[in-house]
Image: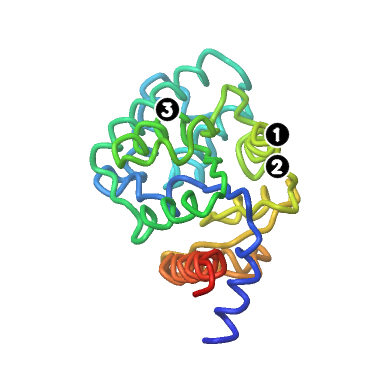
């Protein structure tokens, strides 16, 4: 445990810029509005228009609506069909904000990192409006604003492409060596590698942990609590050093 804490301290201790994935490390967006149903609704919508042939049998059963959207974009990039499908997904994501559940310890972690002077950004495959609306609902918008970067009409630039991470780094004036990405999927890890930033995997369950480890992620946590504890200890140490001697 002590060795693990030390590894975590070394990983996050010097991070002056922290890039958060949104759905996972910050909240469970589809907690009350299941992602699988959204993905199936996309497939049904395509089928009603005689377009389900754009998807393979595996893609038609995929539980991730982003995967369905990207599959259609690969076959008809930039088409009106893709634009409409993306807009439908954004509406579903906005609807899901009302029932999203905060990830345990995410709110105090974000506030603590901000209080310690780190600059924070969101780098997500969700629509940026969705992330911004959720953060506003939790009173966290000022911790990130204006650095919320998400899905654009260029769906080929979704993670694992490092595009949104690079946008965040550029906007914040951050060197990759001083940045840390927190994500819960192999695509997050691959994007972090592509952007040249350190990576902390958040594995909310054993399946996520195995997927992250298989992708090459060296350090994962199953809770944000140890991260919060390390930051609070860092803050206490800094206060101690700043206090004038008796």
**Viewer-proximal residue among 159 and 129:** 129
Residue 27 in sight here? yes
Q: Evaluate if marks 3 and 1 touch, with contact meaning CB atoms under 8 Å apart.
A: no
Question: Dot 2 corresponds to which residue?
Answer: 174
Instruction: Return the disc, 2 or 3, that comes first in the chain's sequence.
Output: 3
**Displayed quadrant of residue 155:** top right
Instruction: Return the disc, 3 or 1, that comes first in the chain's sequence.
Output: 3
Image point (68%, 66%), residue name: 216
Question: Dot 3 corresponds to which residue?
Answer: 129
Q: Is residue 135 left or right of residue 226?
A: left
**Displayed quadrant of residue 106:** bottom left
Q: Is residue 107 left or right of residue 170?
A: left
Q: CA separation, marks 3 and 1? A: 20 Å
Residue 220 in percent (x, y) is at 55, 69
> Counting other residues with Cα less than 10 Å from the Cα at mark 3, is it few (<14), some (14-19), or many (20 or more)?
some
> Counting other residues with Cα less than 10 Å from the Cα at mark 1, is it few (<14), some (14-19), or many (20 or more)?
few
Question: Dot 1 corresponds to which residue?
Answer: 170
The answer to whether residue 8 is above or below residue 83 is below
Secondary structure at numbered mark 1: helix
Q: Evaluate if marks 1 and 2 touch, with contact meaning CB atoms under 8 Å apart.
A: yes
Residue 208 in sight here? no
């Amino acid at each position: 445990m002590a060795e693990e804490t030390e590894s975590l301290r070394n990983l996050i201790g010097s991070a002056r810029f922290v890039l958060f994935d949104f759905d996972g490390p910050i909240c469970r967006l589809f907690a009350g509005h299941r992602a699988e149903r959204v993905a199936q609704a996309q497939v049904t919508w395509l089928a009603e228009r005689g377009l389900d042939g754009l998807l393979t049998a595996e893609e038609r059963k995929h539980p991730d609506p982003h995967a369905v959207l990207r599959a259609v974009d690969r076959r008809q990039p930039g088409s009106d069909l893709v634009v409409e499908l993306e807009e439908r997904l954004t509406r579903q994501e906005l609807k899901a904000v009302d029932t999203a559940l905060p990830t345990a310890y995410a709110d105090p972690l974000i506030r603590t990192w901000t209080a310690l002077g780190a600059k924070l950004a969101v780098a997500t495959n969700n629509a940026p409006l969705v992330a911004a609306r959720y953060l506003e609902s939790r009173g966290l918008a000022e911790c990130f604003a204006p650095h919320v970067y998400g899905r654009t009409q260029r769906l080929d630039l979704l993670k694992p492409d490092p595009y949104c991470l690079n946008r965040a780094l550029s906007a914040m004036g951050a060197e990759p060596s001083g940045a840390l990405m927190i994500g819960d999927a192999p695509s997050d890890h691959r994007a972090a590698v592509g952007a040249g930033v350190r990576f902390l995997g958040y594995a909310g369950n054993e399946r996520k942990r195995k997927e992250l480890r298989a992708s090459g992620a060296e350090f994962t946590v199953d809770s944000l609590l140890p991260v919060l504890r390390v930051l609070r200890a860092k803050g206490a140490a800094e206060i101690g050093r700043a206090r004038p001697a008796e």
